[in-house]
Amino acid sequence: MLRLAADMARRRITALLAVACAVLGGAALITATGVLAESGLRSHLPAGRLGDVDVVVAADQTFRPGGDLPIALPERGRVPAGLTDRLAELPGVTAAVGDLGFPAALLAADGRVVATEDPATAGHGWASIGLFADPEVAGAPPAGAGEVALDAALAAAGAVRAGDRVLVSAAGRTAEYRVSAVVDAPGAGLLFADPTAADLAGRPGTVDLVGLRAEPGGVAALAAAVRDELAEEPGLTVATGADRGDLAEPEAGAARSLLILLAGSLSGVVLLVTGFAMAGALAVSVAGQRRELALMRAVGATPKQIRHLAAAQASMIAAVVLVPGVALGYPLAERFRAALAERGVLPEALPLTRGPLPALLTVLLVAAVVQVSARGAAWRTSRLPATEAVAESRVEPRAPSRLRTHAGLLVIAAATTLSVAPLLARNALGAAATSMAGIVGAIGLAMAGPALVGRASGALARRLPARASAASWLATANVRGHAPRLAGVVSAVGMAVAFVLTYVLAQTTVLAAADADVHDGTLAQHRIAAPALGGLPADVLPEVRATPGVRAAVPVGTTTVIHSYRMLGETEVESASALVLTPDAPAVLDLDVRSGSLADLTGDTVAVSEDVARTRDAGLGSRVSLVLGDGTPVEARVVAVYARGLGFGPIALSRDLAAGHTTSDLDQSLLVRADDAAGAEAALAELVAARPGLTLEATALDTGGEAPPEVWMNLAVVVVLLGYLLLTIANRLVATTAQRREEIAALRLIGTTPRQIRAMMRREAAIVTAAALAAGLALSAVPLALLGQGFLDRPWPAGPGWLLPAAAATVAAVAFLTTELPTRRALRAAPTG
């Protein structure tokens, strides 16, 4: 059977090249998605400043909802400071160090802020030096509130030495310190006397983590002993080896969750697109061998043997290209990771996990798709009686299956129903339904395509004017007579059009709606922040409020909360960004409050978007259960319900509720509203220039919102998938045209000139292009109209005006080139009778 399959494959190289390209690209995309998912689950940051300790004990920075994937917590949790001495008494411990971090930054003599890796946690107590193995200390430990030690890199960047006096901003307080020592320990940061550090951190009786050093060869035993010691204390975790990195930077470790979400959101689209492409390529390949398969039926081959032969042939091709396809998936995943890192979504130091599991799963999945698709493509020929199969192999099947047609129409109807989601949920889930509706509709078109193309071409033939050229008549007759063959091409190209329109415009529409929310809801004209200092110094707010022309200045921050909601009868849990607001927020923000008031945001209160209020039944006055960013569960009372949740997020916490549950308690930014915008801007610019580390920028009211990194990643995925689709479509068109050599030869034998044949094929390409564009637009029209209505209150989406012309031009170019080139090649050979 394998030898026979190989012999048949050698005579159908063009068609099988289309199969090879589809499998190659599909394997690369599926592998890349799998690598991202595995990295989200298993990858770890480097241990960094914890590299010299063997065991780390910290607050558990992971929330584990029952039945769902764990969710990383980005805000630093705390552990009791007394735990350090308690663990130091365990057998096998050679050193135990309690470490705490807080915002700190060195101000150079020239007025600049000396950069640190994470200003929000750059300050530490002198005890933290014990985390490093044999650090070189030039000087003496800081002895009081007026002294500080610096790591060597920081001292060099600030051009200071031991004994110099420097300005330091620590926990929002700027003061002069004497440099007592320079420590050669990477990442040590700014080291204060332990009592001073405890005062600056503002969290008495707690530390961020405890680092333990074990006797040689005793790491495993010590880790087990620590776990036994802490078995009765929930909320703590013990880490060794690679796991230490996530405890060193929990906010960066939380970015791994994005990889899981990205892979999850891509997997459905990637599997549908690649499955569609591979099935289409295999259908063309098997269709080109109908004559050989029919003759085998005539000489006694059973239906099962015919299907097995088709599957064996496809599997041979897949086996050849699967290895390079899988290998290509790993660098493709790396490109995705690099793009995310460039946008600041992932830490640059987070590596990908390049294990064998994604490759294995890809091989199994692609092999299954190839088997099912090949057997499905050969099903009709294998089931026909031998004589009927031979007779049909000489012509195209004329009567499409009614069952297939009706099933395809039902799928299209289901896709239309799916596109109603934006009217019900004005969030990312509703927008994702639009993208999925276009792809599902294209699958329905592939099923019902032969009947639809046959009817449309029949109507075209009846309306063709009598004065039409011979090439036009021939092209129309060919489209009508070979509707099943061309329907596959029309559905593939239509899918590409629908995919581009729905996927891109879903992203741009959500972005436009979010921008509109932010634009309409931001009353402030200016934003003041201090990212280089780890947060705004405490004295900035009164200074800004005292600035002439300033009407209101209100601190605004963000954190992460975990909340649950009901969807399709199931409880879903997800993390979301949440605003941190004070009761003064209405002076600078208009969230379009529908009930309650933001002025009531004091104590354990929250405001929620209408979407959250609906899905959680969280109306005004009700209490909602949340998990804050450091893992603390809270019950909060809803004091306001607002409409602009797409731009400002689903939840807003009171500043009181968030206090003590974020990595830094400093304000992240101030929103400033001025009566005299121009005059106030000059005064604010002068204030900022006099305070190192402060930044002044216009709010989204003047500049427009910036696209979230996830949007750019989704658009990048669109480009990759579109390239894959166009490649498979091009190969499919080439294979379809190459299989018509006998038809072209017959036309030449009855007197048709090469010029007329080329004209006929061009008109066929034009008909196919027009039909595919019409199909793609028809599949996209309802989902995009409902998307626009749900998000923008108008029946059309937002997006670039050039998208549709560009898609049409690309599709036309692919269709004409992949038809013209094989036709010219076929015409080079002399026709034989």
Image (spheres, rainbow, N blue to C red):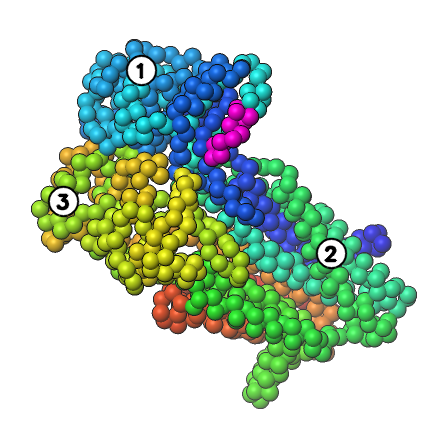
State the residue at coordinates (57%, 65%).
Answer: 440
> Which label was assigned to residue 441?
none
Q: Earlier in the sequence, mark 2 or mark 3?
A: 2
Image marks 2 and 1: residues in contact by CB distance under 8 Å: no
Is residue 717 inside the magenta stretch? no
Nearer to me, 645 or 3? 645
Q: State the residue position of label 3.
A: 545
Q: State the residue position of label 1.
A: 182
Nearer to me, 299 or 582? 582
Cα–Cα gap, marks 1 and 3: 39 Å
The relative height of residue 28 versus residue 735 in the rendered view (above or below) is above
Considering the image in quadrants, where does the N terminus appear? bottom right
Which residue type carries mark 1?
Answer: Val
Bounds of the magenta span? 226-237
Q: State the residue position of label 2.
A: 371
> Tag count in the figure?
3
- Which of pointers 2 and 3 indicates the residue nearer the eye? 3
Outermost residue to the bottom: 466
Is disc 1 placed on a helix, strand or loop? strand
- Which of pointers 2 and 1 indicates the residue nearer the eye? 1
Which residue type carries mark 3?
Answer: Arg
